[in-house]
Image (tube, rainbow, N blue to C red):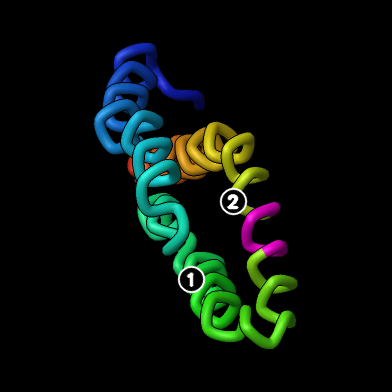
Amino acid sequence: MGLTTEEQILIEQRVANSAKSPAAAYLLWFFVGWAGAHRFYLGRPGSAIVMLLLNIVGGLTAFLLIGFLFLGIWGVWWIIDLFLIAGLIDADKGALRQSLTQQALAQQRS
């Protein structure tokens, strides 16, 4: 048995209310993206920490020239994230929608 229209509407409302804000993610990317803040916000703490460390280590070792490699990697990643943010938000919404749908179906069975 599938979900009723009312259940589907309730799930979509919960997804919309719980979803990460694209505007907030892009503002974090622009202003504190050097620290990976947008990745922390989007629930990706591991890659956020790597991004932060690349920036810190790159800045501290720039005088040795190796730091420019770290800063270059960080910079390319930062630019790529500009295009990834929307997809990360959509993936988060999809996972939440699937989880809520499974919960609703499980409640119907019991």
Q: Find numbered disc 1 in the image and state the secondary structure of the residue it sits on.
A: helix
Q: Find numbered disc 2 in the image and state the secondary structure of the residue it sits on.
A: helix
Instruction: Give the percent coordinates (x, y) of residue 48.
Output: 49, 65
Q: Can residue 51 be seen by looking at this rendering?
A: yes
Q: Which residues are magenta?
A: 72-76
The residue positioned 36% from the left and 46% from the top of the image is 31
- Residue 74 is inside the magenta segment: yes
Instruction: Give the percent coordinates (x, y) of residue 36.
Output: 45, 60
Instruction: Tell which of 87 and 61 is nearer to you.
Output: 61
Instruction: Tell which of 48 and 63 is nearer to you.
Output: 63
Amino acid bearing label 1: Leu
Answer with mark 1 or mark 2, whichever residue precedes in sequence.
Answer: 1
- Residue 88 is inside the magenta segment: no
Spatial separation of the CA atoms under disc 1 and disc 2: 11 Å
Residue underneath mark 2: 78
The residue positioned 66% from the left and 78% from the top of the image is 67
Tell me: residue 59, above or below residue 41.
below
The residue positioned 54% from the left and 76% from the top of the image is 59
Instruction: Give the percent coordinates (x, y) of residue 1.
Output: 50, 26
| Numbered mark located on residue 52 in the image | 1
Tell me: residue 30, above or below residue 50.
above
Instruction: Tell which of 6 and 76 is nearer to you.
Output: 76
